[in-house]
Amino acid sequence: MEERWTPVVRALRKRFARDADTGELEAYLSEQGYDQGQIGEILSLLAGNSVTASDKRARLLPRAVSFRVQGPHERGRFTSEAWGYLMTLSGSSSVNINDFEQLVERALVHVDGRIGLPEIRAIAEDGGFDDVGVGSDRTQVH
């Protein structure tokens, strides 16, 4: 875990339940003054369950975890917020590895240019992975 985010991630783990809504976490972090790039990094680290030497109190539960690294063709397309959201879905076990890859592939095929948080959320919601209520202000992706 990046040292500068260790206290933030530790505080989030204390404040929120493990299965807390991503939108709730984002709203809280936004209220604390973090920008969308920082929020994406923090959520990605929170979903990754990383532990550093300075975070000795944190525990990892023994479980099989796949490790996914962005390919070069994905790095230029996904914003850090969008990738952090995907990592959060994956880390919370909302999606399995096959569904994760399907979400990534759908985003790459159906979205022109950079893939931001609104676009990936719309794709996740379309696939039934994001249970956000009706009336959202998100961009619809076809």
Image (cartoon, grey):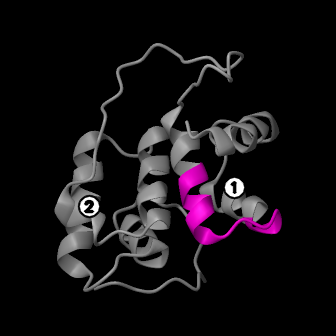
Local packing at callout 1 (Cα closer than 10 Å; few below 14, some 14-19, many 20+) is some
In the image, what residue type sits under mark 1?
Answer: Leu
Q: As displayed, is residue 53 above or below residue 79?
A: above
Q: Residue 31's x, y, as percent?
A: 82, 67
Q: Is residue 67 left or right of residue 59?
A: left
Q: Is residue 102 magenta?
A: no
Q: Secondary structure at mark 2?
A: helix
Other residues around mark 2 within 10 Å, as few (<14) / some (14–19) / many (≥20): some
Task: Please give the residue where the numbered disc 1 appears in the rendered image.
Answer: 25
Residue numbers of the magenta segment: 30-42
Q: Considering the whole magenta stretch, tell me its main secondary structure.
A: helix
Q: Secondary structure at mark 1?
A: helix
Residue 78's label in the rendered image is none
Mark 2 and mark 1 lie on one chain; the one further toward the N terminus is: 1
Residue 13 is situated, as x and y percent measured from the top left of the image, at 72, 35
Where's residue 123, x and y in %? 36, 71
Residue depicted at 68% across the width and 23% down the height: 55
Amino acid residing under circle 2: Val
Q: Is residue 52 left or right of residue 92?
A: right
